[in-house]
Each structure stands twice: as structure tokens, then as C-alpha cells.
Image (cartoon, helix red, strand yellow):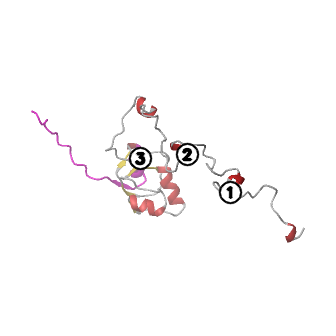
Amino acid sequence: MKLNDLHDNAGARKSRVRVGRGIGSGVGKTAGRGQKGQKSRSGVAIKGFEGGQMPLHMRIPKRGFNNALRVEYAEVNLVTLQKAVDAGKIKAGDSLDGAALVAAGVISHAREGVRLLGKGALTAKLNLKLAGVTKSARAAVEAAGGSIELPVVKPVVERKPRNA
């Protein structure tokens, strides 16, 4: 076989159809769009439109509740921290917060804080500054000789109703 014998398989490269280029092309005049109407013109955006009737996505009942004030944490397990220590991404005895965990590649985003979960075991001594921790995770970190620092939470002040 020589370089000049190389070629694509038959039908592997197909040129695009140039619509609206005369009746001899087979897709001239209406350019394959049929005739008349909104869809035959450019700039059509009628995905959920049903001719003035209430669209289906608005007719069906809505369920559940999406809390706009929900706090989303980046969750980290003990086993993940231990693997990072074993791989040399984190040094034992280091003081770690969300930014340090992102820099080490343990998590991709710190979100609104990091929450430590108790899956797995931890043998390395780590000083952690986190947004939340489970009881089992706290016990494991302290058993390994580390410490956990949580932010100070202000008590919620009860408000009186306006009309009272």
C-alpha cells in the first residue's frame, strides 16, 4: 500500500445540503420548509406553545417545595481525607479549611461550606475548620489526635407577628 492509494470509504465524507439555491437542487424555493406559516420563517420559538391553550407544563399540578434559602454543603467522608493523606495531597497535622481542600484536589467546590461525614476510618492527625460534622466523624478525628473547629452560630431571634 502506498500513500497515494489511501482514500476514505465511499460515503464517508458528505457535503452539506445548500438549501434555497434554485429548483434544480431539489431544495430550492421553500428550502425544504413546506409552505407558509410561522414555522416556515426564521426566528421561531414555540417549544411549549399550544395555540393559546394553556400549555401542558402549566396545566399539570406542581408538587413539593424548593427552598430558595437552602444551604448546600460540599460533603467529604473520612475515607476521602485518609486517601488524600496517603497520596501526599495533604500532610498530617495540617490545618485544613474549604479552600485548602479545594487546593489539594480533595473536593472540586467548597460551596457554602464543607461538611465532614463519618464513612471510613481516619488515622492521620488533622486540624479541620468546617461548616458541619457528624458525631461519628468528630469522634474519629479526635481519636486520631486531630481537632475540629466549627463556626459560631448566632441564635435565631424570634420575631413577633406584625399584626400583634
Residue 24 in percent (x, y) is at 72, 53
Badge 3 crowding class, 10 Å Cα cut-off, few under 14, some 14 to 19, many 20 or more, is many
User: In the rendered structure, which amino acid carries the disc numbered 3?
Assistant: Ala
Badge 1 crowding class, 10 Å Cα cut-off, few under 14, some 14 to 19, many 20 or more, is few
Task: Write the residue at 53% across / 56% down.
Answer: 83
- Asked if residue 154 can be seen in this view, the reply is yes
Residue 148 in percent (x, y) is at 35, 53
Mark 3 / mark 2, whichever is N-terminal: 2
Task: Write the residue at 34% across / 51% down.
Answer: 131
Task: Write the residue at 77% across / 56% down.
Answer: 12
Give the distance between the C-alpha atoms of the residues marked 1 and 2, in whole angstroms.
20 Å
Give the distance between the C-alpha atoms of the residues marked 3 and 2, in whole angstroms.
62 Å
Indicate left or right for 9 with 97 as reference: right
Of tags 1 and 2, which is closer to the observer?
2
User: In the rendered structure, which amino acid carries the disc numbered 2?
Assistant: Ser
Badge 2 crowding class, 10 Å Cα cut-off, few under 14, some 14 to 19, many 20 or more, is some
Give the distance between the C-alpha atoms of the residues marked 3 and 1, in whole angstroms.
60 Å
Magenta span: predominant SS is loop
How many numbered discs? 3
Which of the two residues, 160 or 133, is positioned nearer the viewer here?
A: 160
Q: Which residue is mark 3?
A: 137
